[in-house]
Amino acid sequence: MEYTLLVISAIIIPLIFFTYSLVSFKKKFIICTIKNNNIKVIKDSYYSLQLLFCIITCVLLVFESVIAINNILFFTCYYIATFLFINYLLKFISIKMNFISINGE
């Protein structure tokens, strides 16, 4: 039972995140993990890049779920680390490509 719930949640979380990213792409807002009051979108290309990174994140999360599902602690650490790493990588690349700017940095 516990294993089944873990597998279901491992698939549902990326689907929810993907849906949220599609909505943010359509409505042109920044995803919550890097949202900051000081961030300003300079080019609308940022939203396409954000969607691409979301797709990569979702694929990695599902892939990691298959690999690390037997160890809950390992699975949780991978899940959180992947999610945060990809989103901060998005922020870094967006700044370097001049898609966003951050006031005060």
Image (cartoon, grey):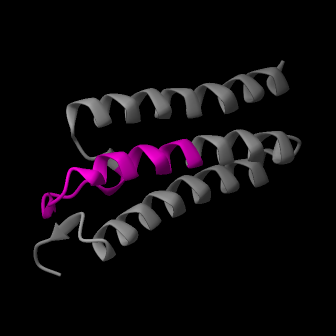
User: Seen in the image, is 56 located left or right of residue 30?
Assistant: right
The residue under the point 35% across, 65% down is 91
> For the C terminus, which image quadrant?
bottom left
User: Seen in the image, is 25 located left or right of residue 14?
Assistant: left
The residue lying furthest to the bottom in this view is 105
Front residue of 101/65: it is 101
The residue lying furthest to the top in this view is 1
- Residue 8 falls within the magenta-colored stretch: no
**Vertical placement of residue 83 versus 42, above or below:** above
User: Seen in the image, is 85 located left or right of residue 67?
Assistant: left
Image x and y of residue 1, in percent: 84, 18
The residue under the point 83% across, 39% down is 66
- Residue 38 falls within the magenta-colored stretch: yes
Image x and y of residue 47, in percent: 30, 47
**Vertical placement of residue 99 versus 64, above or below:** below
The residue under the point 81% across, 21% down is 4
Magenta region, residue range: 33-56
Image x and y of residue 77, in percent: 67, 56
The residue under the point 26% across, 47% down is 30
